[in-house]
Amino acid sequence: MSPKPLPAVVIIGRINVGKSSLFNRLTETGKALISPIPGTTRDYNLGQVDWRKKTFQIIDTGGINIDTLKNSIQTLLTDKKQPKSMTADVIEQEIVIQTKKALEKADLVLLVADGQAGLMSEDKELAMVLKKLQKPTILVCNKIDNQKYQHQTAEFFKLGLGKPWPVSAINGSGTGDLLDELVKKIKGSPGRPKKTDIPDTVKVALIGKPNVGKSSLLNKILNEKRVIVSDIPQTTREPQDTEISYQGKNIILIDTAGLRKKAKIEPGLEKMATRKTQQVIKSADVILLITEVDKTLTKQDSYLAGQIKDVRSGIIIVANKWDILADKDPAIDTKIINSYQRHFPYLAFVPIIFISAKTGRNVDKILDLILAVAKEKQKQVSDQDLEKILKKLVKKHWPSQAKGQNRPRLYSLAQTRFNPPEFTIMIGQNQSIHFSYLRFIENQLRENFGFLGVPVKIKVKTR
């Protein structure tokens, strides 16, 4: 049985009132990008808040001009599609669609205004439209960083939305009182889930160069337009978490900004987005390295693959855009696999899946493959099985030394860690073992126990 969806609180406001800063403060994360550049947030951000034994979902909406935002809310009242503006760019039109979807599922709306700037005409217009929506609304006056701005909140009573709640998303003042009020307004809010009720969670990061189809793939897996897709590089700026339940497991799919060469990364938003993507790589359980099967692999693909291997997450290579690949002869699969293995010789243990995020080819197989790799990452091998393998190793190939004249003696092989798997080989005092023999041990472990898509580390210890 699917768990009951959490109540949704949606943050709305004109550009640069501090919506994303407030989102980060309430969720106690640094998930949303913060910058003075208008329209920094594009896709809506999802977060979870636990307060006073209640749990709810909070949604930070994208930055668009007030007229566009107002029109998107009005379309909910009339249940009509919003006409596409000839002047608004593709991304802004997509932000409107995202904002409308967020408001449709809202149980409560937080209207955020700039308390330092005072009451603006745009705040009045937005308040009027929200009243027509007839959803519970809390008015938040942000940027009240010290006492000298407190008196300015009084004029916000004119909006007719009740008491304006003064907060500072930067230093956190007033946010506890705001949360107290917020949980009072949410009806039917469930309590915190018991630990025993929480299924295993697998964090999956979608990584790749700009425009390889990461966002398109996420939307196809979810069968909905969760994130904005366009031909403009860096359309996705912030990691976008989407949690789903599949085969009794929680899977968090994280769409990320496309990674370019260091020399080409521009200061500002792109540099911040790149830093967040690198943080996601370090924390992921499984990484989907997304490439374009219709194009030749590049040095940047190799650089990304190297970064991913070093963090020791599970890895799946996704060869996207199969639908536009030309000259598909019967042996094309084998040819491409060989090409990928030549380009990524250090990822020979990684499965490759050919997909089309556009047509849906093989997309339905990705979640099963993710769970399979996540399971391999947790695998533990018994001491008895490792003892048998050690005897076979020596019979097949006597170990060679890295330095010195004496061949090393192998005393034991033990698994000293899992998730990711790590093994320790014990050799004699003042002995050494050649790296090629360590690779031989790894290959034998894989041959006997699998570890599909999972890096295996082998440490050497002397008696």
Image: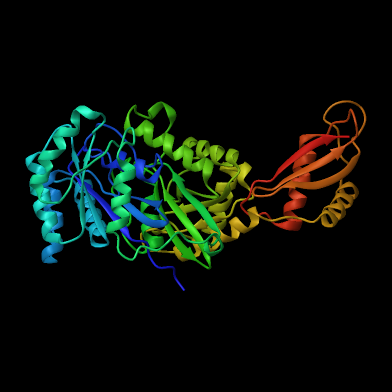
Left/right of residue 145 with respect to residue 89 in the rendered view: right
Q: Position of residue 215 (x, y in %)?
A: 36, 51
Quarter-of-image position of residue 77? bottom left
Figure disc tally: 0
Which quarter shows the C terminus?
top right
Horizontal side of residue 430 vs 52, given as left or right: right
Q: Residue at x 18, y 36 (%)?
A: 115
**Who is closer to the viewer here, 68 or 137?**
137
The spot of residue 211 in percent (x, y) is 36, 45
Q: Foreground residue, 227 or 233?
A: 227
Residue sitting nearer the eye, 248 or 253: 248
Left or right: where does residue 426 sit relative to residue 210? right
Q: Does any portion of residue 11 appear in the rendered image? A: yes
Relative to 210, is 83 above or below? below
Tell me the colour scheme of the image. rainbow
View extreme (bottom): residue: 1
* Residue appearing at x 82%, y 30% in the figure: 402
Res. 236 in view: no
Q: Against 423, is 102 above or below?
A: below
Percent from the top left, x then y, of residue 168?
Answer: 28, 35
In the depicted structure, whether residue 152 falls above or below residue 292: above
Residue 293 placed where, x, y %? 45, 51
